[in-house]
Amino acid sequence: MGLDNNIDTVQNTSKRQNYSRINLSKKDILSLSIFIVSLFLVFTLIISQLQNEIVIIIDEENQIIESIAPNYSLISVLSIIFFTILTTISGFYFLLDLSKNIELNSKQKVQLQLLDKEEREIYLFIIQRGSVLQKDIVLELGLSKVKVTRILDKLERRGVIQRLSYGNTNKIVIK
């Protein structure tokens, strides 16, 4: 019972750390940026056509103000459609990517208990992605190459991960 509570605490703590720090990967930042820019462009394209008025001045005292219906060109319509689709796709990618839950089996829960903070962060990162390149761990977690190499050495010695040669880097998988 005590071990299960500790495992749940570790899982909740590591989930809280990821979301409280807003630790976004480059893909998440790119998708969020595309979402914001394309959403802005859709609204700009739509609103720019809504404020069309014609003022006809008959004499100094009399004038006629007529609002005209929006007249979208083919390019405007296609742009609105394109940026709406781009907004939708990038928004769904961002939301679905953040909502990934890590399901741990009993062996992984036990191994998680034996790891320190940085080892746990890398271990959960590898589990979440299935397999990962060593250089991606460096880039996405913001750790130095040396630190990642040392942590992966420890995890490999413990039999937790396996490194496979992959060009100039290593592919890391859970054993």
Image (tube, helix red, strand yellow):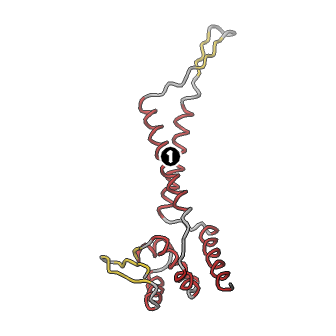
- Image point (66%, 83%), residue name: 6
Nearer to us in this view, 100 or 109: 109
Q: Which residue lies at the image location 47% right of the left edge and 80% below the top edge?
A: 144
The quadrant in which the N terminus is found is bottom right
What residue is drawn where x is 62% and y is 73%? 17
Query: Does 67 sit above or below residue 168?
Result: above
Q: Which kind of residue does numbered mark 1 sit on?
A: Ser
Is residue 76 depicted above or below 28 in this figure?
A: above
Relative to 49, residue 104 above or below:
below
Residue 20 location, x and y as percent? 64, 68
Picture coordinates of residue 39, whole percent (x, y): 54, 45
Q: Quadrant of residue 78?
A: top left
* Direction from residue 129 to residue 118 in the image, left or right: right
Image coordinates for residue 173, horizontal then vertical, percent: 41, 78
How many C-alpha atoms fall within 10 Å of the one at disc 1: few (<14), some, or many (≥20)? many
In the image as oriented, which residue stretches furthest toward the bottom? 157
Residue displayed at 56% across by 39% down: 43
Decide which of 23, 3 is in the foreground and name it: 3
Point out the image quarter for the C terminus: bottom left
Displayed quadrant of residue 7:
bottom right
User: Which residue carries the number 1 mark?
Assistant: 38
Of 175 and 82, nearer the camera is 175
Q: Quadrant of residue 46?
A: top right
| Position above or below: 21 against 175 | above
